[in-house]
Image: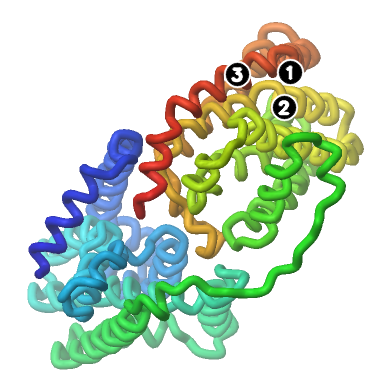
């Protein structure tokens, strides 16, 4: 059965509609993987020298064990945001004579073989070999390495338990913050010396190998608990059943002022308000609006006026970037129904453009108080707002025609990368890097004011040719219509 599952995974990888688009990002991630492997190897070979410099009076192995606690909580924090349980698309399997426990064991086993679990070995193995070369007992070092592997796997399954708890809360990142924060506070204020207990525990296991049964039992308990949680979700009438809840309705009469695009704007606003994933776009607006407060009050950035443009583009365009990059994937759940209606594609896209343009104007107005830190900041934000409306709105709409990944709106919002593909990564080049490059060029060659003027003129040109640009974008969406419908029918 495991062989059949692996075969299905292989076919799903190559037969997916997003294969061509996601292949580029997979290659890019391959380079990042190679980079981290080399970095961990480098740190592993120098680990003894680093520890000797930091703790000259301690044995390197004892010093490493003393830092295990901080490595564990850091590893958990990173895993929570970047490692998700690799659950297969099990709906089609539930109608087949396949034991649920086989599916669950495969999913959990696949998670244990994740690259993030192998990465520590690139540092631990070289460090262990150097310890053996320095006359450490070979069996002691091998047992220590085995314990580190067990701790890594414990973190792997503990992360999924925390994720299952976080899925039940509106603030999905709250459980991990509370858990890690509590552990760190207990250790920091010496209420419980967790770092010392963990260090002494690992040392005790290396001195008495029989005690290795303790981390093994902890790992088995976590595995069984994960098995129970996942198995309970593998029912068509429970775990996979859509939740039904009441929602507050609103006529949104004010949207009728936008004419024939009003129905589409109402749909978008209701979609944003009623779903976890889209609500994050609203919260990101607040973060983007206050983004400048992290930099402008600091004297260092006051002498870097070219940096004002980056903050201006990001601050006024945060909703445009966060919401726009997933157009039309937000509607993927009912895209087939939407496209079967007698509606004009141009109206559908125009409503998206209007929503993004209005958000830019509102964010610019709300950001006017930044003039307190200097008139150059207000000028940069004004030029960035015009550029966002005239250029970036069209760029992000055009990029949306290449979206091929479905989005589950019911999933948690924070740090959710489901539905993210190569398009979302590559679109950042014209959205942020291009205006920064143009601005920097004219800023260093001529002046700050001329650089702002150039970006504002580019935005004005985009506004003037808006109708022509929308016709070209609409044509591109029409050409990709059936490819998107087919892709959105798949579970990516």
Give the answer, above or below, for where 55 lies relative to 460: below
Q: Residue furthest front?
A: 342
Q: Which tag is nearer the camera, tag 3 or tag 2? A: 3
Sooner in the amino-acid sequence: mark 3 or mark 2:
2
Residue contact between numbered discs 2 and 1, judged by CB atoms under 8 Å: yes
For the question of whether residue 149 can be seen, the reply is: no
Residue depicted at 21% across the width and 61% down the height: 121
Q: CA distance from mark 3 to mark 2?
A: 17 Å
Q: Residue furthest top?
A: 446
Find numbered disc 1 in the image and state the secondary structure of the residue it sits on.
Answer: helix
Q: Which tag is nearer the camera, tag 3 or tag 1? A: 3
Sooner in the amino-acid sequence: mark 2 or mark 1:
2
Give the answer, above or below, for where 300 lies relative to 107: above
Residue bearing the label numbered 3: 471
Residue bearing the label numbered 2: 389
- Residue 245 got which mark? none
Residue bearing the label numbered 1: 463
Q: Quadrant of the N terminus?
A: bottom left
Sooner in the amino-acid sequence: mark 3 or mark 1:
1
**How packed is label 3: few (under 14 Cα within 10 Å), some, or many (20 or more)?**
few
Q: CA distance from mark 2 to mark 1?
A: 7 Å
Q: Position of residue 35 (x, y in %)?
A: 30, 42
């Amino acid at each position: 059965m495991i062989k059949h599952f692996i075969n299905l995974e292989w076919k799903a990888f190559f037969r997916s509609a997003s294969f061509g688009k996601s292949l580029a990002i997979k290659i890019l991630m391959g380079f990042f993987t190679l980079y981290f492997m080399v970095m961990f190897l480098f740190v592993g070979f120098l680990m003894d020298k680093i520890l000797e410099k930091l703790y000259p009076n301690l044995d390197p192995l004892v010093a490493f064990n003393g830092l295990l606690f901080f490595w564990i909580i850091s590893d958990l924090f990173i895993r929570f945001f970047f490692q998700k349980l690799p659950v297969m698309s099990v709906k089609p399997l539930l109608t087949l004579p396949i034991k649920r426990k086989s599916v669950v064991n495969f999913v959990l086993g696949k998670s244990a073989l994740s690259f993030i679990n192998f990465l520590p070995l690139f540092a631990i193995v070289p460090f262990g070999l150097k310890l053996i070369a320095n006359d450490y007992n070979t069996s002691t070092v091998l047992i220590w390495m085995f314990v580190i592997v067990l701790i890594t796997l414990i973190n792997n399954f503990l992360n999924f338990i925390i994720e299952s708890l976080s899925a039940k809360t509106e603030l999905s990142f709250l459980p991990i913050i509370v858990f890690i924060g509590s552990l760190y506070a207990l250790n920091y204020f010496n209420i419980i010396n967790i770092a010392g207990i963990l260090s002494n525990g690992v040392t005790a296991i290396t001195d008495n190998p029989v005690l290795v049964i303790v981390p093994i039992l902890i790992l088995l308990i976590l595995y069984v608990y994960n098995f129970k949680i996942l198995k309970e979700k593998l029912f068509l009438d429970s775990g996979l059943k859509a939740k039904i809840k009441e929602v507050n309705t609103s006529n949104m009469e004010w949207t009728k002022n936008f004419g024939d695009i009003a129905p589409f704007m109402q749909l978008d606003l209701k979609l944003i308000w009623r779903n976890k994933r889209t609500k994050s776009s609203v919260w990101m607006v607040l973060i983007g609006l206050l983004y400048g407060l992290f930099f402008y009050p600091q004297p260092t950035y006051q002498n870097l006026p070219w940096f004002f443009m980056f903050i201006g583009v990001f601050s006024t365009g945060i909703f445009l970037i966060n919401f726009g990059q997933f157009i039309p994937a937000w509607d993927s759940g009912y895209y087939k129904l939407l496209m079967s209606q007698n509606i004009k594609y141009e109206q559908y896209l125009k409503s998206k453009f209007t929503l993004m343009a209005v958000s830019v104007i509102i964010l610019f107005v709300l950001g006017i108080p930044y003039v307190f830190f200097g008139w150059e900041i207000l000028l940069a934000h004004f030029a960035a707002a015009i550029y966002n409306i005239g250029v970036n709105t069209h760029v992000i709409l055009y990029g949306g025609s290449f979206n091929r990944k479905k989005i589950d709106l019911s999933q948690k919002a924070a740090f959710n990368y489901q539905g993210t593909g190569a398009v979302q990564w590559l679109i950042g080049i014209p959205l942020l890097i291009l205006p920064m490059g143009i601005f920097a060029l004219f800023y260093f060659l001529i002046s700050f004011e001329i650089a702002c003027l150039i970006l504002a003129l580019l935005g004005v040109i985009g506004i003037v040719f808006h109708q022509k640009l929308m016709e070209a974008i609409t044509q591109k969406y029409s050409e990709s219509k059936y490819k998107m419908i087919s892709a959105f029918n798949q579970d990516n």
